Image (cartoon, helix red, strand yellow):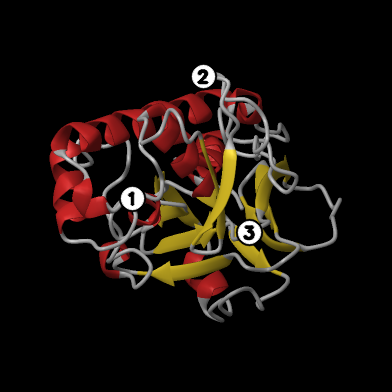
């Protein structure tokens, strides 16, 4: 599944459309995770794209009179073509057509979605989200407060989108490794210094991933057609039975909330 760095990379690839006129949207398949609203095409036609930004894993198209909320789902991707091009791929579901170019949304598994709303901040998919992980609002003191109110382990806590958005499975394992915190540790047992280390590590891991284009996953490609390359820098994720790069202890794999989790039993306590 594309995680926050992959979505950010995709957003940057289509940022050039900001300020242009969205002449039309063509929906070829409305049956995504949620059905695409029937009035979406009419209500978005010939509107200027005021702003393009991201909230968690959602790409938000701010038009003159409405907002479009796009989620890539588990296998969704965007690519850019000339407006007159008629070269289509299987699972191309939506076209965002501008004067000279268009953005095509492709999603084999159809777990993505496209919504339209007048009030983006109160939309059901946005209103309950926690702070952005790279923002000043996500800090040690904030995380400690979340930990005090939780009875779960720290990996589950930082993957909960109500606490902080965008720290998916890969980046949670990597962040906890850098902060030297065992992913199974009870959240309530963390102190302020440990929380600050987790925050700092998460920001570092996500920033690096964004810089190099996300994590290489078989289903993910940026809108400009290039894959991510962060996978070559992973310290623990997917490295079970291999030696820790720091101490040469064997990396362990456990399952937390049905998600594969990787850590070094020596470096992470």
Give the CA distance from mark 3 to mark 1. 24 Å
Give the CA distance from mark 2 to mark 3. 35 Å
Q: Quadrant of residue 153?
A: bottom left
Of the image marks 2 and 3, the number of the one nearer the N terminus:
3
Assess disc 3: are there few (<14), some (14-19) or many (≥20) residues with their C-alpha within 10 Å of its C-alpha.
some
Closer to us: mark 2 or mark 3? 2
Give the CA distance from mark 2 to mark 1. 23 Å
* Residues at marks 3 and 1 touching, judged by CB atoms closer than 8 Å: no
Looking at the image, residue 248 lies above or below residue 238: above
Q: Which residue is mark 2?
A: 247
Q: Evaluate whether residue 17 shows in this view.
A: no
Q: Which residue is mark 1?
A: 154
Near-viewer residue (83 or 197)? 197
Give the residue drawn at x 42%, y 46%. 167
Could you say whether the residue bearing mark 1 is in a helix, strand or loop?
A: helix
Assess disc 1: are there few (<14), some (14-19) or many (≥20) residues with their C-alpha within 10 Å of its C-alpha.
many
* Residues at marks 2 and 1 touching, judged by CB atoms closer than 8 Å: no
Near-viewer residue (100 or 93)? 93
Q: Which residue is mark 3?
A: 74
Q: Quadrant of residue 120?
A: bottom left
Q: At which x and y percent is residue 150?
A: 22, 61
Give the residue drawn at x 31%, y 61%. 152
Q: At which x and y percent is residue 14?
A: 56, 39
Assess disc 2: are there few (<14), some (14-19) or many (≥20) residues with their C-alpha within 10 Å of its C-alpha.
few
């Amino acid at each position: 599944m594309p995680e926050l760095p992959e979505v950010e990379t995709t957003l940057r690839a289509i940022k050039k459309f900001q300020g242009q006129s969205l002449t039309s949207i063509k929906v070829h398949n409305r049956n995504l995770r949620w059905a695409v609203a029937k009035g979406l095409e009419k209500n978005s036609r010939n509107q200027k794209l005021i702003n393009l930004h991201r909230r968690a894993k959602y790409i938000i198209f701010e038009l003159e009179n409405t907002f479009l909320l796009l989620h890539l789902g588990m296998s969704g991707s965007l690519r850019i073509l000339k407006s007159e091009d008629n070269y289509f791929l299987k699972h191309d579901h939506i076209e965002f057509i501008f004067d000279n170019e268009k953005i095509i949304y492709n999603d084999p598994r159809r777990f993505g979605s496209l919504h339209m709303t007048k009030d983006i901040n109160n939309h059901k998919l946005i209103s309950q989200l926690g702070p952005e992980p790279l923002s000043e609002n996500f800090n040690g003191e904030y995380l400690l407060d979340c930990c005090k109110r939780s009875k779960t382990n720290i990996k589950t806590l930082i993957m909960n989108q109500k606490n902080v958005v965008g720290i998916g499975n890969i980046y949670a394992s990597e962040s906890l490794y850098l902060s030297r915190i065992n992913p199974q540790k009870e959240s309530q047992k963390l102190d302020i210094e440990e929380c600050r280390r987790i925050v700092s590590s998460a920001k570092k891991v996500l920033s690096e991933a964004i810089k190099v284009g996300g994590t290489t996953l078989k289903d993910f490609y940026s809108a400009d057609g290039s894959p991510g390359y962060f996978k070559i820098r992973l310290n623990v994720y997917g490295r079970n039975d291999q030696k820790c790069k720091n101490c040469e202890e064997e990396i362990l794999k456990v399952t937390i909330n049905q998600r594969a989790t990787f850590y070094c039993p020596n470096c992470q306590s």
